[in-house]
Amino acid sequence: MLSDRQSRKLMSHLDKWQSQVVHLRWKLDKCRWKQIVRAADVAKGVRLRAKEARLKAKLFKVQAEMRRECPSMLQNFEGPSLACLGAKYGLVALLDAAQERQHLEKPFDELQEAPIILATANGHFDCVQYLANHQVNVNAVNTLGQTALHVAASTHDVEILRFLLLQPRINIQVRDSNLKTPIEVAQQCAAASGDKFGLYASCIQALEEKSASNPTATSTAADPPQIASTQASTTPITTTTSEQFQVHEILEVETPSTSLECVVCMDRPREAACIPCGHRVLCLTCASSLTSTRCPICRIQVQQIIRIYDN
């Protein structure tokens, strides 16, 4: 058994490595974005692919260092603590050691975050996949009313968000304590902090496609006790038949004012077209930040923004 001092030192090392993992993933996103933007520059593309390989090697090395601490953690932690620490630091071995499903779902820390929310917040796709495959509640909420889908949308983790959307019981209509659905969270974050790499736009697009493809199932697939426990006093959400048809009608009979809103700010009309691809999904204000980057739909480099006037 580790002493209190040794335990604190171990957790300090894990926090440091986790910070490095987050930073390296950000650099990988930037490197991949540059490869798309500068696709026409062959020499630059070769250098960027080499840089991506080096970043992946560094990321693997840091994660290997974290995995080496698994034996010590297995000796000093048990049950729910193992599950949550495994989810936080991306250590699937700890999740596997927790074994029982109740440990894989039990909330942890002051925010009462279930392991699947912790794994999503820290960007550990393999842990999210492990937990979902072990039938945990993918609609579990923390004290802020956020599900893993809210968290994936706020951190623009496209890979985890798309995986969660494939889960049969996922509910994309859940509202957090600020009365926002996952798609509204992504829109708010994009408007507040910008979307330089087009990741928020990808999240918004995936959520819109899920909503359009299966509108009624998403409003009934949740585990009611989990969601109602944090929202019953603030959010008038029900799963009645009339609510289902109301959602369906809104998606089926969209008016021009709602169907042509900018996918980022959702306030202004889609009046800007990206050249050369021609996609029209942004307002002029949001499109101005994409002039030297890429289209949020097809990821082709945007050379020019033109304004479209409707009759």
Image (cartoon, helix red, strand yellow):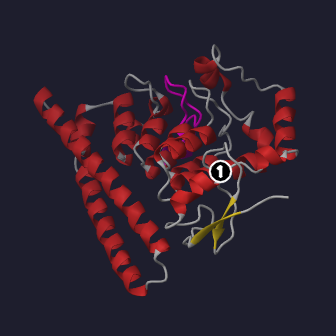
Q: Which residue position is annotated with label 1?
A: 263
Residue drawn at the location 73% of the way across and 45% of the way down: 211
Of the residues shown, which amino acid type is indicated by label 1? Val
Q: Looking at the image, which is closer to me, 161 or 281?
A: 281
Which image quarter: residue 303? bottom right
- SS class of the residue under badge 1? loop
In percent of width and height, residue 270 lies at 70, 54
Q: Looking at the image, which is closer to me, 219 or 197?
A: 197
In percent of width and height, residue 254 lies at 84, 45
Q: Looking at the image, which is closer to me, 110 or 212?
A: 212
Task: Work out whether residue 1 can be spotted.
Answer: no
Which image quarter: residue 135? top right
Instruction: Give the left or right position of residue 124, taking residue 273 as reference.
Output: left
Magenta span of residues: 130-148
Instruction: Give the left or right position of residue 74, taking residue 128 as reference.
Output: left
In percent of width and height, residue 205 lies at 65, 53
